[in-house]
Amino acid sequence: MTSVLAIVFVLGLLIFFHELGHFLVAKVLKIGVKTFSLGFGPKIFGFRVNRTDMQISAFPLGGYVKLFGEEENDFDPRFSEAEDFSKRPPLHRMLVVAAGPIFNLLLAWILYFLVFFNVGQQMLTNEIGGVVDGSPAQVVGLKKGDKIIEINGRPITYWHDIVDIVSNEKKFPLKFKIKRGDKILLVKITPRVEKTKNIFGEEIKVNRVGIIAANKWVHINLSAKDAILLSFKQTWVVTKLTFEGIVKLIERVVPIEDIGGPIMIAQLVSSQAKAGFFDLLALTALISINLGLLNLLPIPVLDGGHLLFYSLEIITRRPLSPEIKKTAMKIGLGILIGLMMLAVYNDINRLMGPNIK
């Protein structure tokens, strides 16, 4: 039951916030909003607020905001001609469309803030837990239990500080200041360049000195200001990584078998719900970023497709013909259905094992 409620909570929050972006920007620009719906299909429940029908519909995998003037020859006595979406300049229409994905990123930031402010951070200490045989660190005599307190004059507090400096520094050797018991040692280490694979499976070169972190963690409580700044950073990092992942998928660096659909999302949500509420919020933030970026893809039917139409309208100084739009929308719908089918197939394949055909 907890898993079901968690899935409903996550999907409802993602859909609501996305559509809220469209809704609020349309309202700010004084564009008529006919319907705000969570879900597609037949209406299950609804009411009217300030000329807008608020409703919950039968099929929960999505939602929509219906604007006055979106359809050809639209007529509704609730709205005036000045509120017609189709008669607004392209920039207004682009702002309304882009607001959905932007609100997905805003939601991610809010959720990360809630996580960091309430849970804080768990950080690995600067203590060495092991030294690789034959490595540069072993050559200069580093040992298990040593604490790295400075590299090239830069103070070290946590393990990620070590990783950042060793990975990004270009001038060698690196000057390490080590605390061993009551003693302070100074050593110079030239990292060894090694080949490894990044998260996308690409071969890359990295600097390594041959030390392993001790599995010792410290908990850091964060102020509201620190949580705000860190949530911005986390949202940016995950957004950048997600964008790179989409590009790698298009380039076929990431195999299409890695595409996940609703079944995988439900499994992840269920798992994180059992781990804890704030784990669930962190996953929801991740999904929200993915949803926002995917919606910006220039595929007709998606928000990115509409942004492409309006961009072409600005360039050509005239709207695309209804025939071209209809054809493009059909193609876009076909692509979207194909991607959904592929995602569901991958989900089932993961559930049933590699032998499914």
Image (cartoon, rainbow, N blue to C red):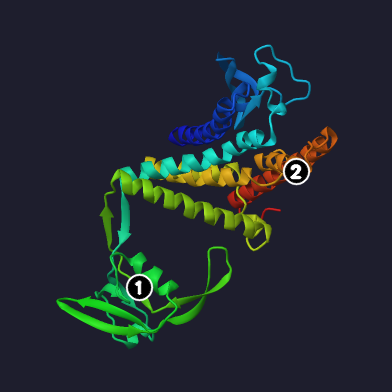
Task: Name the residue furthest front.
Answer: 317
Dot 2 lies on which element?
Answer: helix
Residue 108 location, x and y as percent? 47, 43
- Whether residue 15 sits left or right of residue 120 in the image: it is right
Q: Nearer the viewer, mark 1 or mark 2?
A: 2
Going 79% across and 40% down the picture, which residue do you hit? 328
Going 49% across and 79% down the picture, which residue do you hit? 194
| In the image, residue 65 above or below residue 179 | above
Q: Which residue is mark 2?
A: 312
Is residue 354 visible in this depiction of the protein?
no
The answer for how far apart the CA atoms under marks 1 and 2 are is: 53 Å
Dot 1 lies on which element?
Answer: strand
The count of marks equals 2
The quadrant holding residue 130 is bottom left
Residue 83 location, x and y as percent? 65, 21
The quadrant holding residue 117 is top left
| In the image, residue 148 above or below residue 310 | below
Task: Name the residue furthest top.
Answer: 77
Residue 1 location, x and y as percent? 45, 32
Going 34% across and 82% down the picture, which residue do you hit? 137
Say if mark 1 contacts mark 2, CB within 8 Å.
Answer: no
Q: Amino acid at mark 2?
A: Leu
- Whether residue 222 sits left or right of residue 28 in the image: it is left
Q: Which residue is mark 1?
A: 212
Lower sequence index among marks 1 and 2: 1
Residue 322 vs residue 234, the one in the foreground = 322
Task: Name the residue furthest left.
Answer: 182
| In the image, residue 163 above or below residue 101 | below
Q: Amino acid at mark 1?
A: Ile
